[in-house]
Image: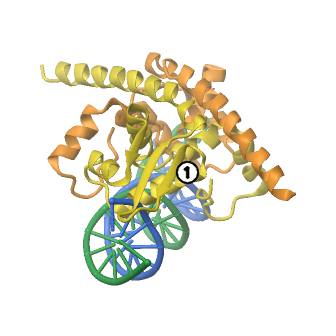
Chain colours: A orange, B yellow, C blue, D green
DNA sequence: CGGAATCCTGTCGGATACTG
DNA sequence: CAGTATCCGACAGGATTCCG
């Protein structure tokens, strides 16, 4: 939970941030790629850095590293380094990360629902 | 889903954005206050603008308005305007918004869990 | 009361070049 | 292979002022 400082927050707000579990969750998954990363990890158990890179078209190495580091900080993702000739790093979900999978699934069905309704609305507005 | 354009995204990415329901969900709830707003609405059914403002210490009127408008665009929140002497505007969850409540609850218990583990880890590191 | 319209600023995402 | 280290620009969030 390193990030999310914003400028000067009063103490009461900081407490709110700390106390409200919802905010904790929000901070943990805030980031353009985190949810998709978690989803890929939930589907594959173990993924190497460059594999993940290929799974996320449009992301750059630097960003992927940062998102992964933050997920690691928040204990969602485990990072295993193998010191072989050409370095090999495997990412996987932690126990805490696996507990998040149901939420991912719920978010997916909910998103599908929303998507359908938006399409319906666009159809209607054509006529 | 107005925002989230970023600069020039290739077509394949745009398609991914549009297709992946997870991303749709992410975009819908991305925003510093949205989750908390949804939570308050889930607890109170109907809340007036200034009430909501008071429930969110640290937010400014402008921001609250924007977050609510975006939630409205994404069909999570309903806005009811009463044209009385002193204007009165009530916010509530839509059907789609209510479908999101289980996710909020899951996020809350998950966040509580994460919080506890972080506290444990801090305790340990003291000795 | 519930905004709209500005303007400002920090953060995050992204691009690029370099490294063990 | 899997990163670091910089630098940059865009955009969300925030403060402030004005309005019906």
Please tell me which residue lies in front, B62 or A8: B62
Percent position of residue A113, x then y: 69, 34
In the foreground, A53 or A123: A123
Q: Residue furthest left?
A: B127
Location of residue A106 in the rendering, given as x and y in whole percent from the top left corner? 59, 25
Nearest the eye: B58 or C4: C4
- At horizontal 72% and vertical 41% (from top left) the residue drawn is A117
Q: Callout 1: 10 Å neighbours few (<14), some, many (20+)?
A: many
Q: Which residue is mark 1?
A: B72
Q: Residue furthest right?
A: A127
The reply, left or right, for residue A83 in relation to residue A6 is: right
Please state if A54 lies on the left or on the right of B90 as rendered: right
Q: Quadrant of the N terminus of chain A?
A: top left
Label 1 secondary element? helix
Q: Nearer the viewer, residue A7 or B48?
A: B48
Quarter that holds the C terminus of chain A: bottom right
**Residue A62 in view here:** no
Left or right of residue C3: residue A114: right
Chain letter of mark 1 equals: B
Determine which quarter of the picture holds residue B38: top left
Q: Taking the image as drawn, is residue A77 in sight?
A: yes
Residue at point 66% right, 42% down? A56
Up the image or down, C6 lies above or below B97; here it is below
> Could you tell me which residue is drawn at 64 percent across and 43 percent down?
B24
Q: How many marks?
A: 1
Q: Position of residue A116 (x, y in %)?
A: 75, 39
Q: Identify the residue shown where x is 38% and y is 38%.
A: B40
Q: Position of residue B52 (x, y in %)?
A: 34, 48
């Amino acid at each position: 939970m390193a990030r999310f400082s914003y400028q000067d927050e009063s103490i009461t707000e900081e407490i709110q941030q700390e106390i409200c579990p919802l905010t904790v969750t929000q901070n943990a998954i805030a980031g353009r790629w985190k949810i998709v990363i978690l989803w890929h990890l939930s589907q594959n158990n173990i993924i190497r850095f460059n594999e993940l890179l290929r799974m996320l078209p449009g992301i750059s190495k630097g960003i992927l590293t940062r998102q992964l580091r933050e997920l690691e900080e928040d204990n969602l993702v485990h990072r295993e380094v193998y010191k072989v000739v050409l370095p090999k790093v495997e990412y996987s979900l932690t126990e805490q990360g696996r507990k998040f999978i149901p939420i991912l699934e719920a978010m997916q069905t909910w998103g599908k629902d929303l998507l359908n309704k938006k399409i319906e609305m666009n159809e209607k507005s054509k006529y």
